[in-house]
Image (cartoon, helix red, strand yellow):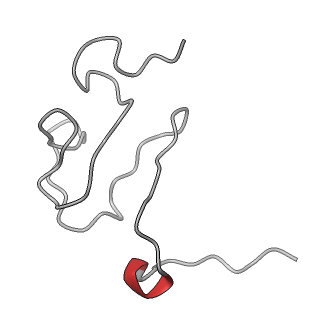
Amino acid sequence: MAAPLRESLDLKQEGISTVIWCTGFTADFSWIHGLELTSRGAPVHTNGASSIPGLYFNGSLWLRNRASGSIH
């Protein structure tokens, strides 16, 4: 039997300090409260670092250049 769907999670209470977002999925950043997005829905960042302390992005298309999202 599958576990019930959780719609929210207290990361600190659950002892979670790291979230790794995988490639190959449609990006949905709506669950990250306070994250600033561009007009195209991409996270605003500087070289992968967001304005939220401890939140970084890696492997996204055009993160630093055209090949940033490529896996070889």
Residue at 18 percent of width and 44 percent of height = 49
Residue at 63 percent of width and 76 percent of height = 5
- The quarter of the rendered structure image containing the N terminus is bottom right
Count of number-bearing discs: 0
- In this rendering, the answer to whether 63 lies above or below 22 is above
* Residue 18 x/y as whole percent: 42, 61
Q: Which residue lies furthest to the bottom in this view?
A: 13
Residue at 43 percent of width and 88 percent of height = 13
Q: Which residue lies furthest to the right in this view?
A: 1
* Residue 2 x/y as whole percent: 81, 74
On the rendered structure, is 19 left or right of 54? right
On the rendered structure, is 3 left or right of 67? right
On the rendered structure, is 8 left or right of 35? right
On the rendered structure, is 22 left or right of 55? right
* Residue 21 x/y as whole percent: 46, 47
- The quarter of the rendered structure image containing the C terminus is top right
Residue at 27 percent of width and 47 percent of height = 56
* Residue 41 x/y as whole percent: 24, 42
- In this rendering, the answer to whether 14 lies above or below 65 is below
- In this rendering, the answer to whether 40 lies above or below 33 is above
